[in-house]
Amino acid sequence: MDITWLGYSAMRLRTRNATVVIDPTDKSSGVDMARPTGDIVLISRDHIHHNFVSGVKGTPFVIDGPGEYEVGGVQIQGVRSRWSVSQEDVFEPTTFYILQAEDMKVVYLGGLNEIPDPKQIQVCSNADIVIVPIEVPEGLSPQDMARLVRSLEPRMVIPTAYQVEEKKKEDALNSFINEMGVEVEDAVQRLSLQRRSIGDKTRIVLLNSRG
């Protein structure tokens, strides 16, 4: 499996049989993801920074809500959460995803601004890889996201959706890393993974944003 950070919270996962694009974003997010090709698109929120399907080449199978799916050999479970959009208990739906492919379990947490309930946490636990946006406007703080991720006991953590400029990224990324309290690896352009290469010890892997 190859994993690439396209920019903001947009990710691309390539398996032997399918390419999954998660949360495709338009340029108003501040990044240009350069129109990736995808067989499957996963959308966590109905927002242009997360649902820019027309920015993905091809005719992908689009998933934008809860349910269980199998496409191109990738098993996908969407789990409904919610996003508070005002101080008046108004909520909009959001979805996070669990993917199974090539003997690996990948959890994409999406932009959360509430801690998932215990049942939702349980279904995300013991993942091989957790991909977690840590600086989404009005979302959970980097520290709260780190505490949530720690509770899932993943083997590999990939933070996304933080400022990539050196002067701007320090607060969010360093806050997340410090709260996680685990080993951090140098940033790479792309991850190429097999299950046996992940190991059993929780570690943080940084990706360079392509956008």
Image: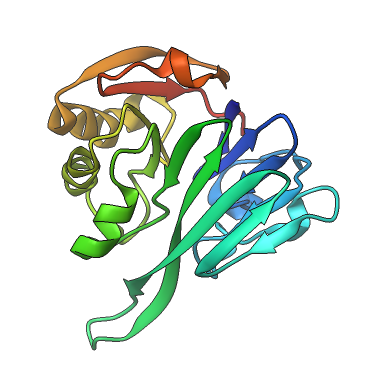
**Residue at figure coordinates x 67%, y 32% from the top left:** 15
Q: State whether residue 131 appears in this view.
A: yes
- Placement of 158 over or under 47, stated as above or below: above
**Residue at figure coordinates x 59%, y 29% from the top left:** 4
Q: How many labels does the image show?
A: 0
Q: In which quarter of the image is residue 80?
A: bottom left
- Placement of 144 over or under 182, stated as above or below: below
Q: In this view, does 165 lie to the left or right of 13?
A: left
- Expressed as whole percent of the image width and height from the top left, the position of residue 136 reads 37, 52
Q: In this view, does 113 lie to the left or right of 100?
A: left
**Residue at figure coordinates x 43%, y 27% from the top left:** 165
**Residue at figure coordinates x 29%, y 19% from the top left:** 200
The foreground one among 200 and 40 is 200
- Placement of 164 over or under 126, stated as above or below: above
- Expressed as whole percent of the image width and height from the top left, the position of residue 144 reads 17, 48
- Expressed as whole percent of the image width and height from the top left, the position of residue 210 reads 61, 28
Q: Quadrant of residue 7?
A: top right
Q: In which quarter of the image is residue 209?
A: top right
The foreground one among 119 and 168 is 119
- Outermost residue toward the right in this view: 58
- Expressed as whole percent of the image width and height from the top left, the position of residue 172 reads 27, 37
| Screen quadrant of the C terminus | top right
- Placement of 74 over or under 139, stated as above or below: above
Q: State whether residue 114 appears in this view.
A: no
| Screen quadrant of the N terminus | top right
Q: Is residue 86 left or right of residue 188?
A: left
